[in-house]
Amino acid sequence: MAEVRLQEGESIENALRRFKRKVQQEDIIKEVKRHSFYMKPGEKKRVKQALARKRNRKKARREIDS
């Protein structure tokens, strides 16, 4: 659970910016999206494999460019 307390003399905009950064770092949005609907185990496996293939292609491209 992300929590941000207003500091002395801090504007709401700055606190909101800190809150958004904290939520992003903790991957809260990703978790909520992941739990928002049921995914069959086979489908989950296919998505995971597709992400792994995408990561590997990206890694290979970086190695070629370097």
Image: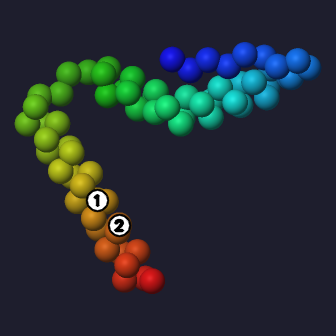
Q: Secondary structure at mark 2?
A: helix
Q: CA distance from mark 1 to mark 2?
A: 6 Å
Give neighbour class at mark 1: few <14, some 14-19, many 20+ (Cα, 10 Å).
few
Q: Position of residue 44 (x, y in %)?
A: 17, 36
Work out whether residue 39 or residue 60 is closer to the camera in this orientation and state it.
Answer: 60
Q: Position of residue 48 (x, y in %)?
A: 21, 45
Name the residue at 39% across, 23% down.
32
Work out whether residue 6 or residue 50 is closer to the camera in this orientation and state it.
Answer: 6
The disc label shown at residue 54, or none: 1
- Amino acid carrying label 2: it is Lys
Residue 58 in the image: above or below residue 1? below
Q: Secondary structure at mark 1?
A: helix
Check contact, mark 1 vs mark 2: CB within 8 A.
Answer: yes
The disc label shown at residue 58, or none: 2
Name the residue at 11% across, 28% down.
40
The disc label shown at residue 44, or none: none
